[in-house]
Amino acid sequence: LGVAVTRQGQILLNGVISTEEAVTAAVKAALEKNPESQAIIAADGEARHSDVVKAIDLVKSAGMNRFALQIERPEKSGP
């Protein structure tokens, strides 16, 4: 299950702009199919910390405790 946070704070579910409710429902559905399901939570390097924490809380509050974080670092300018 893929959850992503954009720098604008939007939540994407498997690459599609989504809502908090849809993410919660998708997590619960995934866990019903397979209790060992896990999520990858990705965030733009310029996403606000609070938006990333919100995504983590959504996944955890829906019952999924197995997840990995993937953070895209901002590009460095200069040498």
Image: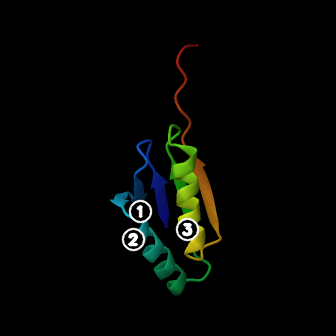
Marks 2/3: CA–CA distance:
11 Å
Q: Amino acid at mark 1?
A: Leu
Name the secondary structure under disc 2. Answer: helix
Please tell me which residue is depicted at 47% across the width and 72% down the height of the picture: 24
The single residue placed furthest to the left in the displayed view is 17
Name the secondary structure under disc 3. Answer: helix
Q: Of the numbered discs in the image, which one, if any, rests on residue 13?
A: 1
Question: Could you say where residue 53 lies in the image, as x and y percent from the top left?
Answer: 58, 55
Marks 1/2: CA–CA distance:
8 Å
Marks 1 and 3, the one that precedes in the sequence: 1
Image quarter (top left, top right, bottom left or bottom right) of the C terminus = top right
- Asked if residue 50 is positioned above or below residue 55 in the image, the reply reads above
Name the secondary structure under disc 1. Answer: strand
Please tell me which residue is depicted at 41% across the width and 71% down the height of the picture: 21
Circle 3 residue? 59
Please tell me which residue is depicted at 50% across the width and 74% down the height of the picture: 27
- Asked if residue 47 is positioned above or below residue 13 in the image, the reply reads above
Marks 1/3: CA–CA distance:
11 Å
Q: Is the C-beta separation of discs 2 and 3 under 8 Å?
A: no
Marks 1 and 2, the one that precedes in the sequence: 1
Q: Which numbered disc, 1 or 3, marks the residue closer to the eye?
A: 3
Q: Of the numbered discs in the image, which one, if any, rests on residue 22?
A: 2
